[in-house]
Amino acid sequence: MDDRPGDIRLSTPKGRWVILTTVLGSSMALLDSTVVNVALPRIGEDLNADMAVLQWTINAYMLALAGLILLGGALGDRYGRRRVFVIGVIWFALGSLLCGVAQSGEMLVLSRALQGIGGALLTPGSLALIQASFHPDDRSRAVGLWSGLGGVGAAIGPFVGGWLVDGPGWRWVFLINVPLAAICVPVALRHVPESRDPAAHDTHFDVLGAVLGALALGLVTYGLIAPQWVAGLAGVIVAVVFVAVERRRPDPMLPLSIFQSRLFTSVNLVTLCVYAGFGGFFFLVALQLQVVVGYSALGAGLALLPTTVLMLLFSAKSGALAERIGPRIPLTVGPLLCAAGMLLMLRVGQDASYLADVLPALVVMGLGMVTLVAPLTATVLSSVDTARAGIASGVNNAAARAAGLLAVAALPLLAGMGPEAYRSADEFGETFNKAMPMCAGVLVLGALIAVVMVRRPAPTPDGTEVRPECRVNCGVGAPPLEPRAAEAPPGLQRG
C-alpha cells in the first residue's frame, strides 16, 4: 500500500527514499544558483572572458529557468511527475558536464542555458513529487524536511563552491552534479511512485506563451548586456504580444485573471523589486570580495555564510510573526533593512576588515531577508484561493528569477562597468560603489509598494485559510522555496 502515490508514510524506508531523491534533485539546481557567483573571477581568467560573458554565465541559466519553469510543471502534471523529474535531472547533468568541459565563454553560456532547461523540468517536480507521494497526515512534515535539508544545502553552497574553485578548480562546480545525478536517477526510478494530475489531460500546453515569454526576457537581457537598444525594444514588443496572447487563450500559461487580486499583484511587485536587488547584490558582492578585497574563492564563500545562517535559524519564527501581525510591516521593514545592508557594503574596499566592515553589512542584510522572505512567500499563497496556490507560487517564482536576471544584465551597464572591470580592483570598486545604491533604491521602492498596497489577506473564497509554512530561502538571491498550503499542492505543478 505504501507504494501508491498519496499513501507513503514519512517514517517508512520508502518515504526516506522519496525525500532523498527530491532533495538531491532540487539541491543540484539550487546549488548552481548559488555557487557559480563565487567562481566567476576564476572562470573569466581561465577562459579569457569579459564581463558580458560572466553576466551571461549567470543569466543564460536563469533565463531558461524563468521562461520554462511553468511549462515544466505542466509537463509533469500530464506525463508523470517522476518521469519529467528524471528527464530533468539527466538533462541537467548533461548540461553540467558540458559546462565543466567548456573551452570558451560561448560554449559555457550555451551549456548554462541547457542546464536551465533541465532545471525547469526538475525544479517543479521535486516538491510536486512530495505532495503527490506522501500520505496527507505526513505531507506537511515531509515538505518541512525537504525545505530544511534544502536550506542546509544552500548554507554550505558558497563554502563548497569556494572550496572547489580553490581546490580542484572551477570546472568542478559543474562536474559535481554528474555523480549526484547518477545517484538520484536510479533511486527515483526504483523508489518514487509515478503520479499525474488527471485534470491536466483536459488542457492544452501553452507552448506559444512559453516561447514568447522566454523570447521577451532573452531580448531584453541581451539588449541590456550588449548593449543593443533595438534588441531591448524588440523584447518589450514581444512582451506586449505575450500579454495579448495570454489574455485570449482559454488555458494560458500565465492566467492574467490571477492579477485581479490586488494583494497578489502588489506582492509580486514587491517580489520584482526585492529579487532585482538581491540578484544584483549577490552577483557583484562575490566579485567585490575577490577582485577588490582580495579574498580567495573559499574566503568569499565563507564570508557570505551569515545571511544564509540567519535565514536557517529564524525564517520559521519570522513566518509565524507575520501570521500574527500581517504582512505589511515585514514587507516594509525587511526591504529597508536589506537596503541598509547594501549601503553598509560601501565601506568594503581594498583595506576592509571582515569583522568591522563586511560582517556588519551581511548581518544587516541577513536580518532583512529573515524579516522579508518567509512573509513574502506566505502572502503570495494567502492572496488566492487554495485551488490556485500552485500557479500563484509558480508565477511568484518566475517573477523572482526574471527580476534577478534583469538586474544582473542592467547593473553593470547602469554603473558604467567596462568589459574588463573585474580585472581591475580600482575600476571594479568604483563601479561597485555606484551599483550598491541602485540595488538599495530598488529595495526601498519595494518597501514603498508594500506600505501603500499590501494588506492582511482576506479569507479565501472557498472558506478555507491558506496557512503556508515558509521555512528557508537560499541566502544568495534564489527565489523562495515553495511552502505548503491547505490541501492544494503549492509547488510549480501547473502551467
Image: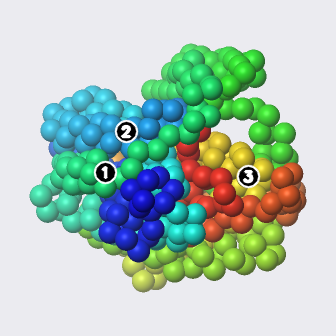
* SS state under label 2: helix
Q: Which residue is mark 1?
A: 188
Q: Which mark is residue 386?
A: 3
**Residue kind at label 2, given as amino acid type:** Arg
Q: Earlier in the sequence, mark 2 or mark 1?
A: 2
Q: Position of residue 340 (x, y in %)?
A: 63, 69
Q: Residue at x 81, y 75 (%)?
A: 325
Q: Which mark is residue 92?
A: none
Image-quadrant location for residue 62 = top left
**On screen, residue 187 above or below 399:** below
Q: Position of residue 78 (x, y in %)?
A: 51, 33
Q: Earlier in the sequence, mark 2 or mark 3?
A: 2
**On screen, residue 196 above or below 17:** above
Q: Position of residue 386 (x, y in %)?
A: 73, 52
Q: CA distance from mark 3 to mark 1?
A: 29 Å
* Callout 2–callout 3 Cβ contact below 8 Å: no
Q: Residue at x 30, y 36 (%)?
A: 91
- Name the quadrant of the N terminus: bottom left
